[in-house]
Image (cartoon, rainbow, N blue to C red):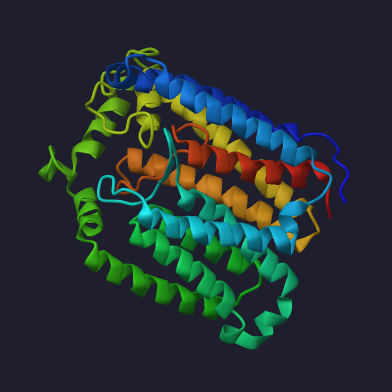
Amino acid sequence: MVKPQGINKKLIIPVIILSIIGAIAIFSASAILSSETYGVSYYFFLKHLAYLIGGFILMFLVIRAKSEFYKTPAFVYGFLLITFVLLLMTFTSPIINNTQRWIRFGSFSFQPSELAKLAVILYLSYFFSHKKEQLKKGIQGLLPPILVVGIITLLIIKQPDFGTAAMIIILSGIILYLGGVGLRYLLGIGTVFMIMAAIMLYFYNYALKRIVTLFDYESDPLGRGFQIIQSLIALGSGGITGVGLADSTQKLYYLPYAHTDFIFSVIGEEGGFIMTFIIVVLFLYFAIQGIKTSLKTKNLQNYLIASGITFWIVIQSLINMSVVLGIFPPKGIPLPFLSYGGSSLVVIMFAVSILIKIASGKSR
């Protein structure tokens, strides 16, 4: 049992500020689309606000909980099992844009692959903190986590969702390394996953085309290079101070997914370099506080969980911003706290609440 000792303000403040910026940006970016689709300009904004409020309520409940329930085998394996079942359920859902990533409940939908990121972090953290003797068995001892991560990755690739699959592989590699797995084993495991990725790229030709387009997006400005070009136009139009709130031109159907994957482009156009710089600084501050939290705890499981969650949010943020800047190919990865999307927002809020609990509870 861990007695709560208040909320770690250094971690929650950047989350609150980013969430407020995100809500305002989503209203601006989605107002026209919302009005033409649903007859009101605030449909997406209110839906996002409901998810955001729900996320903060969940965060409060987790932080105030008297036990570290997220560390127990019952929760870890139960959470993992639910994730497996939900991932399998996506293949019974309707095909949307040639993908099966969502489970629908009336007007609401849920993306299980977002849950998979946290499930993998919690499972690997538990495995390497409670089964240290497995490391002495070499590759044989690593088979359980390799199989778990491999199956989850394959299920997500099958949807297909290469961006999330890549995120899970990266996070798994980080936790394996921090958990004490030797470099030669990591290189071997990494090689296997690289071969798997190459095979998948061969069978899913569209993903390979996205990578190729990244190096020559101007050759197909109305096709595969359209998103990147419109994103760069938005950022370039913003200049230093931006064109002003709600005055973005690119969100008027020039920039696809303006309120989701490319929300950073709209923020850059309306708020300029100043606003994008503020966002980067907030993520950097969050990263520093998250790393400090992981280094302060003497409990290995908490250390791995805190590290995994921190790297997850920071790496996902970097990938999203890199896509917007034309450095990475479009991957469908949302920007934490800022992009529209209930599944991503609620799961990340849950993950952050665990991180804040570790920092605030002084658990050792």
At horizontal 84% and vertical 55% (from top left) the residue drawn is: 364
In this view, which residue lies farthest toward the front? 106
At horizontal 33% and vertical 56% (from top left) the residue drawn is: 160
Quarter of the image holding residue 40?
Answer: top left
At horizontal 40% and vertical 54% (from top left) the residue drawn is: 90
Q: As rendered, which of 313 and 269 lies closer to the eye?
A: 313
x and y percentages locating residue 263 in the rendered image: 39, 30
**Relative horizontal placement of residue 71, taking residue 217 as reference (left or right):** right
x and y percentages locating residue 243 in the rendered image: 34, 14
At horizontal 68% and vertical 41% (from top left) the residue drawn is: 353
**Relative horizontal placement of residue 228, taking residue 297 as reference (left or right):** left
Is residue 145 at all visible to an observer of this figure?
yes
Is residue 22 at all visible to an observer of this figure?
no
Q: As rendered, which of 211 and 103 lies closer to the eye?
A: 103
Vertical side of 286 occupied by 28: above or below: above
Quarter of the image holding residue 119?
Answer: bottom right
